[in-house]
């Protein structure tokens, strides 16, 4: 214990650094960062499950937004750490990066996006209590903002094993400390799918009489694909699945084809959703293309005169999960969610060739249906290529042939430019007059927007409603999309706050998500917030309210100043069209006074799901969604 003081100082400095710059460790201090704390702790339990010692995790949201996570693993080790001279559990909770690397033999594979784990949660929590049952009893240790307040001590006799962590996120750090149970549930569901047999229970105890939600799938990835396809029509009954290991890399793949036109492929490394893909995904795609070409040639479904199927042909309508477990994953890319280990490509490619070829030979009926689908996709691709060529040629002439309806801005630096996509010609007119033409462009949209979820690519590229949007943005579409060519860094959807407005917003978001996905990932899309009410009175400046709570608040403020509701004139706006250009500028477009909602992608799987439920072919899931959510609807105008 000679250097005990010194190491303690290092520990405190480490945690102080986390408190100073929390964003560097958990991404942000928004609601998203708040949820991240829970994932860090649950990831530790999942690691224990991956090691084969734990099969149940219970998460509770307690009154006051405390979180408790409990597992039935071996319990965090309590023995004195040889170098630090303190119990191992204390090391795990106070030393940055203490996770898998400490104490020699770490876990074989380990999840955790940032791999920073428990000490970061501790640094960013008002209180943490860790309880460990290791077979010899129940022991506990407590912390406050990262510092030990009650050292490790025995609490009771206990023969069971496991770890329970209870923490309260620090209100000094986070914008909000209120948890969203649905966000957590979505994540736990995915984790349960990825780890077959693992049972994760979520119980929101903030409300009385609340129900437990249990996520437990013996089918694992097969259940995952079935779940994702519940609002799609599959073209073969069973999910194609295999699980194997090669050169220390575990590969698990499940996929099924549907009548959809888009592809929904999700890839994971050690349970982490690799949003940017990487070598495992490359291997999957390469293997898939080759296996169908080989099969098609062998059985003469692909004739001699036919060209090879291309990657996009064999992926049309596929729903797939690619999950690999790698010992030392290297993460790259902007958000560190892209696998870089080059050896993984050939491993996944070769197991695909093996396993999928076997499956096709054993299931010729399935092989035939899928190959027919890929052939028709190849024909559609040809048509789409011609359509896209046309778009490209039109956009190439960009400066001279910007859409006639577009009122462009003067600024040429795209990072300073905004474009408002406005529903309806009349609102478009007011927006054109009201805007600051230096940096704000207006593109009015009119008529019926197409639903891209139900349309094949070739019909989209030359659709007369979408073409102006594609050309105005200037960055291309689909595989050709190039963020660097984007002409406006803020794309603002401005539609009425009614049912039709929601519809057009949803149609546009579906289009951006499926065909200009980098815009979503990069955070270029915003939704304008026009006011719902105007309060006016002679001699008083007009007051705008953006929702019902806002209205209540402002009425109360006025009352405190002695202005009664009865003496006010209250106007409820039914649409953008009711505002003149000056009002529209003041309430919705002036960067100083407006509110914009930024569209962010927190969970790509949940987003894919909601788009296919709301916009897809299958009616039943949509109906269920509406029945489940109708109670939340506030301003329904019929
Ligand atoms: C509610 C949160 O944190 N559970 C955990 C264990 C079990 C072991 C462990 C954890 C070993 C390699 C560090 C026990 N016995 N739930 C949890 N359960 N950590 S965290 O060991 C520490 C890691 O790197 C454990 C034997 N080996 C490991």
Image: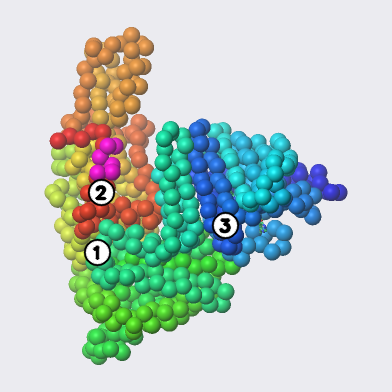
Q: Which badge, 2 or 3, comes first in the chain's sequence? A: 3
Q: Which badge, 1 or 2, comes first in the chain's sequence? A: 1
Q: Is residue 480 magenta?
A: no
Residue 119 appears in view: yes
Q: Secondary structure at mark 1?
A: loop
Residue at 41 percent across and 41 percent down: it is 211
Give the labeled residue for mark 2: 624
* First to last magenta residue range: 627-632
Asked if labels 2 and 1 touch by Cβ distance under 8 angstroms, the answer is no
Q: Secondary structure at mark 2?
A: helix
In this rendering, the label closer to the viewer, 3 or 1: 3
Residue 300 falls in which quadrant of the image?
bottom left
Q: Which mark is residue 571?
A: none
Q: Nearer the viewer, residue 362 or 349?
A: 362
Across and down, in percent, residue 333 comes to 49, 61
Q: How is the image coloured?
A: rainbow
Q: Residues within 10 Å of mark 3 (few under 14, many from 20)?
A: many
Asked if labels 3 and 2 touch by Cβ distance under 8 angstroms, the answer is no
Residue at 21 percent across and 75 percent down: it is 376
Q: Residue furthest right?
A: 2
Q: Is residue 377 above or below residue 66?
A: below
Label 3 CB sits under 8 Å from any ligand 1 atom: yes
Give the labeled residue for mark 3: 54
Across and down, in percent, residue 511 comes to 26, 55
Label 1 CB sits under 8 Å from any ligand 1 atom: no
Q: Which mark is residue 233?
A: 1
Across and down, in percent, residue 140 comes to 68, 42
Residue 582 falls in which quadrant of the image?
top left
Label 2 CB sits under 8 Å from any ligand 1 atom: no
In this rendering, the label closer to the viewer, 2 or 3: 3
Q: Is residue 628 magenta?
A: yes
């Amino acid at each position: 214990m000679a250097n005990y003081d010194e190491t303690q100082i290092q520990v405190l400095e480490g945690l102080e650094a986390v408190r100073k710059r929390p964003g560097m460790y958990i991404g942000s201090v928004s609601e998203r960062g708040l949820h991240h704390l829970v994932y860090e702790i649950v990831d530790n339990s999942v690691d224990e499950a991956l090691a084969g010692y734990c099969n149940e995790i219970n998460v509770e949201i307690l009154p006051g937004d405390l979180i408790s996570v409990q597992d039935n693993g071996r319990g965090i080790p309590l023995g004195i750490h040889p170098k630090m001279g303190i119990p191992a559990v204390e090391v795990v909770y106070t030393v940055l990066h203490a996770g898998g690397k400490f104490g020699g033999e770490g876990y074989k594979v380990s999840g955790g996006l940032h791999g920073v784990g428990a000490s970061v949660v501790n640094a960013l929590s008002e209180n943490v209590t860790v309880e460990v049952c290791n077979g010899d009893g129940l022991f506990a240790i407590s912390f406050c903002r990262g510092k030990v307040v009650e050292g490790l001590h025995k609490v009771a006799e206990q023969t069971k094993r496991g770890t329970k962590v209870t923490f309260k996120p620090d209100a000094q750090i986070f914008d909000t400390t209120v948890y969203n149970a649905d966000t957590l549930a979505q994540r736990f569901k995915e984790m349960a799918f990825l780890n077959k047999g693992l049972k994760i229970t979520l119980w929101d105890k903030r409300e009385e009489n609340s129900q437990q939600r249990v996520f437990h799938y013996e089918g694992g990835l097969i259940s995952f694909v079935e779940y994702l396809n519940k609002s799609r029509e599959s073209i073969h009954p069973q999910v194609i699945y295999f699980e194997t290991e090669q050169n220390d890399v575990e590969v698990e793949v499940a996929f099924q084809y549907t009548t959809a036109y888009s592809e929904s492929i999700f890839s994971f490394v050690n349970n982490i959703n690799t949003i940017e893909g990487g070598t495992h995904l490359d291997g999957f795609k390469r293997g898939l293309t080759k296996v169908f070409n080989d099969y098609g040639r062998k059985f003469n479904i692909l004739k001699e005169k036919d060209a090879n199927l291309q990657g996009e042909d064999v992926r049309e309508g596929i729903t797939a999960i690619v999950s690999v477990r790698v010992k030392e994953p290297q993460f790259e890319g902007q958000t560190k969610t892209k696998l870089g280990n080059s050896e993984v490509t050939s491993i996944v490619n070769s197991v695909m060739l093996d396993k999928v070829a076997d499956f096709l030979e054993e299931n010729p009926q399935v092989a035939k249906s899928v190959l027919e689908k890929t052939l028709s996709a190849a024909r559609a691709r040809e048509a789409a290529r011609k359509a896209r060529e046309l778009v490209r040629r039109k956009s190439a002439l960009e400066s001279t042939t910007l859409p006639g309806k577009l009122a462009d801005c003067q600024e040429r630096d795209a990072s300073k430019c905004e474009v408002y996509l406005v529903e309806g010609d009349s609102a478009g007119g007011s927006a054109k007059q009201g805007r600051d033409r230096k940096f704000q462009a207006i593109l009015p949209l009119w008529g019926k927007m197409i639903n891209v979820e139900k349309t094949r690519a070739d019909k989209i590229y030359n659709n007369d409603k979408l073409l102006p949007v594609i050309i105005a943005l200037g960055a291309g579409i689909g595989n050709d999309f190039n963020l660097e060519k984007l002409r406006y860094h803020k794309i603002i959807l401005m539609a009425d706050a009614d049912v039709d407005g929601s519809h057009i917003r949803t149609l546009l978001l579906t289009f951006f998500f499926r065909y200009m996905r980098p815009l979503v990932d990069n955070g270029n899309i915003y939704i304008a917030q026009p006011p719902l009410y105007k309060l006016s009175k002679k001699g008083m400046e007009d007051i705008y309210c953006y929702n019902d709570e806002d209205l209540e608040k402002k009425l109360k403020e006025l009352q405190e100043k002695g202005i009664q509701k009865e003496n006010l004139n209250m106007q409820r706006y039914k649409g953008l069209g009711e505002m003149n250009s000056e009002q529209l500028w003041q309430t919705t477009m002036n960067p100083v006074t407006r509110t914009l909602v930024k569209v962010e992608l927190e969970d790509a799987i949940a987003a894919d799901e909601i788009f296919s439920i709301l916009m897809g072919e299958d009616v039943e899931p949509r109906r269920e969604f509406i029945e489940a959510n109708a109670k939340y609807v506030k301003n329904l105008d019929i």
